[in-house]
Amino acid sequence: MRVDRLALLAVAAAAVIGFSVGVATREDAGASGVGGQLGMPGALLDYPGGWQLSRGPAELLGTPIATSAALAPQGAAGARLVAGTIRGRTPADLPALLAAYDGAVRSQVVLLQGRAALHLTGVRDGDRTLELFVLPVRLTSPVGPGLVTIACSVPDGAPASFLPGCRRLAAQATIVGVAPVADLRPSPDYATRVDAALARLGRERSAARAALRARRTAAAQAQDAQRAAMAATVAARTIAAAAPPEPARRVNDAVAQGLRATAAAYTALATAARRGDAAAFTVAGTAVAGAERRTARALRGLTVLGYTPEY
């Protein structure tokens, strides 16, 4: 699993005069070209003239979002920037929040005003592509965790010029009124441990599967299925003990649970082969496929957090 090098977004300096909890806007079309300012718990966002402010959706990532607002330039054909704060959530919640969305999600840690944020791309929501900037914060009023979220929501067929402008606005967000949180950057040590466990599992599983297909006796198939079960068991133990950083703990547990389920399914396959029970063998084979899909979904959660697991 490769950990991408930290990428830096240029952040424009901004003078913060005050902050009010809620969506605060300031119209200020002066010589600087700034059309207004949008405030939300944890951040301020300046937007230029020509961008129009409207009320945002009640939910983002399937979760109620506090003080949501939307911005769009004229002629955006439905494309818009949605900004708000998801209260009570931490980075550990992101894999579950994104689980319902399609697309090959990619994640990279970026800096917004010196604070680590996740830049998520490739998220599909129906006929829209979402590009998200998610900054975990510790809100001070009221006290509690939150995810400052800026989403570039682009319908299919929207002008290509919208996305660069939306990214620029997100990069210029001013972070205010929040306390530091855990480091978001992927851990190279953790990535190495997971990578080694998955690589070893991949080798053993491939060999066992090839042997299962080639065997002509039930006894030999049972032996091969048990070999795959042992490989999944070892991988589950290794990953469970991999000491993940705080944001990855929950998804690491899910990966280990998926591998345990995979081991149990292969064990059932071995038992069915040993007994010569064709019906049970078929059921166990279906269980193996389901457990491996479960593991793959859990590993997708690591992708959301900036890792690149191979399974």
Image: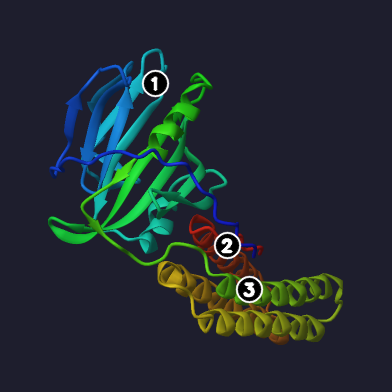
Q: Residues within 10 Å of mark 3 (few under 14, many from 20)?
A: some
Q: CA distance from mark 1 to mark 3?
A: 42 Å
SS at badge 1: loop
Give the residue type at disc 1: Gly
Kindly indicate the quadrant of the structure image that contains residue 37. Answer: top left
Question: Nearer the observer, disc 1 or disc 2?
Answer: 1
Q: CA distance from mark 3 to mark 2?
A: 18 Å
Question: Nearer the observer, disc 1 or disc 3?
Answer: 3
Q: Which residue is mark 1?
A: 78
Q: Quadrant of the N terminus?
A: bottom right
Q: Residue at x 81, y 84 (%)?
A: 220
Q: Quadrant of the C terminus?
A: bottom right
Q: Position of residue 55 (x, y in %)?
A: 22, 28
Q: Residues within 10 Å of mark 2 (few under 14, many from 20)?
A: some
Q: Nearer the viewer, residue 292 or 164?
A: 164
Q: Residue at x 48, y 20 (%)?
A: 158
Q: Which residue is mark 2?
A: 296
Lower position in the chain sequence, tag 3 or tag 2:
3
Question: Nearer the observer, disc 3 or disc 2?
Answer: 3
Disc ID at residue 113? none
Q: Position of residue 174 (x, y in %)?
A: 31, 43
* Left or right, residue 2 beside residue 72: right
Q: CA distance from mark 1 to mark 2?
A: 34 Å
Q: Residue at x 37, y 67 (%)?
A: 182
In the rendered view, would you say 186 is above or below 165? below
In the rendered view, would you say 156 is above or below 230? above
Q: Which residue is mark 3?
A: 192
